[in-house]
Image (cartoon, helix red, strand yellow):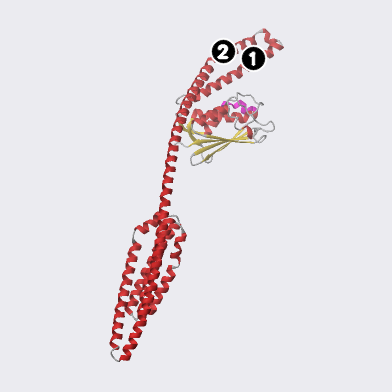
Amino acid sequence: MEHTNQVLLKLENILSLLKDAETGQRGFLLTNDEEFLEPYIGSYYNTIQSYKAIRNLTIDNPSQQQKLDTLITLVEKRFSILNRTIEFEKAGNVQQAHFVVSSKEGKRVMDQIRRVIKRMQAEELRLKEIRYDQVRTSSFVTPITMVVATLLSLIVAIFAYRKTKEAMHKARHLNHELATSNSELLMVKESLFTLNQELEKKVDERTQNLEKAKVDLNHLNQELIKKNNKLVRTNTDLDNFIYTASHDLKAPIANIEGLTYALKDSNCYQEEEPKILIQMLENASLTLREVIEDLALVSGIEEEGSFSDTEIISIEEITTEIQQTIAPLFEETKAEIILDLNETGHIYFSRNNFQIILFNLIQNAIKYRSPQRAPRIYIRTKKLPDFTVLSVQDNGIGFDPATTDKIFGLFKKMHNLAEGTGIGLYIVKRIMDRVNGQIQVDSQPGKGATFHLFFPEQR
């Protein structure tokens, strides 16, 4: 009977340890405080020890041994579920941990464990009754046997009473601990409720701030739209003014040129001082004409349709046309153009605008040539996923990289050594901006300059 009581106590101990493990798991899931895992940490080891003790105590009972095989499988499965939820919680995957708990898989396994233990306890109680009947039957053999059996029964009863009392004391202790844990959990719940209210308050404040910021942003956007519209009107008025001025000034310039030619045919042109003044007047009128023509070209860039007439054009063909247009300049400077169009020799763009771009870059390369060497102009192409890159490189005098941002300004010149209006690169930049293209410049004084033009691919 002592043997049976030990089995019953060990079975009860397994249930108690599993409850401790569940209590620790619940406390940790609720608070994320690892102090609640203390009952859980040693419960698995103690459970296995109790299982091994029962296995040894029931070694002569095949039925109980078979139930123990089922029991250890269920215990391993229960601890696996507990461990999985704890690992999810530690990893910050609270939703997954709660999903495992809410699936009630652990509860089903625990119910199965209770049923197995209950059957084992019933079996032990049945054996206990059988053994008690055997003792009672054998007590009739002799009075001595009866007395001895009675004494033994008393001893067993006392032992069982003490064990039961100890178990009850332990149960009361565990109940007290459970009550304390519940009280602490209640406090934690109240704290979480308070924190949740504070968080909701902060969220409301943040939402109000965001709404206010949204209103302010809308006001700023409205102001920006107004200023942008004003800027568009200003640019339009400026373009109209440039266009009108460039056309209205052509007649006075033609008159000045006519007067200059008339003065050159007069007798005063034979005298030295008037001759110099007339030549200066002629040069000034030519320069003024170039400026007016360039301004007309600038205003013409913005005309409707100037970017809609795109076509596939040959870079080599445009280069040849430009060489023929300024052939005297090429002959005078012995300039040479070297083409490297291996990746692509064509580009989809406005023919007129591409001629303007390439003409200005080639003309600048010759204008700002080095006096120590003949101009060499390298024109290369490169294909990128979203762009066709045209590079124009010269071996001229170059310029300081610090002035790169200024060279594309209106009437800005890289050097005062060459004649020009300072509008060419401005026109190039304006055309590229209109098609959302890009320009990059690499240059060093005395080492020439390279212009990289990024033409967006037409889709």
Q: Secondary structure at mark 2?
A: helix
Residue 167 spot, x, y in % from top left: 38, 72
Q: Quadrant of the C terminus?
A: top left
In the rendered image, which residue does mark 1 sit on?
281
Is residue 330 magenta-colored? yes
- Of all residues, the one furthest to the top in this rendering is 267
Residue 79 visible: no
Q: Is residue 3 above or below residue 382?
A: below
In the rendered image, which residue does mark 2 sit on?
252
Q: Is residue 282 above or below residue 379?
A: above
Residue 175, quarter of the rendered image: bottom left
Callout 1 crowding tier (Cα within 10 Å): few <14, some 14–19, many ≥20:
some
Residue sitting at x 44%, y 40%: 205
Q: Amino acid at mark 1?
A: Leu
Residue 140 visible: yes
Q: Amino acid at mark 2?
A: Pro
Segment colored magenta? 323-332
Nearer to me, 350 or 184: 184
Residue 402 spot, x, y in % from top left: 63, 34
Q: Is residue 95 above or below residue 19?
A: above
The chief SS type of the magenta part is helix
Residue 72 spot, x, y in % from top left: 37, 71
Q: Quadrant of the N terminus?
A: bottom left
Nearer to me, 321 or 253: 253
Residue sitting at x 33%, y 85%: 150
Callout 2 crowding tier (Cα within 10 Å): few <14, some 14–19, many ≥20:
few
Q: Secondary structure at mark 1?
A: helix
Residue sitting at x 40%, y 70%: 170
Residue 350 spot, x, y in % from top left: 48, 30
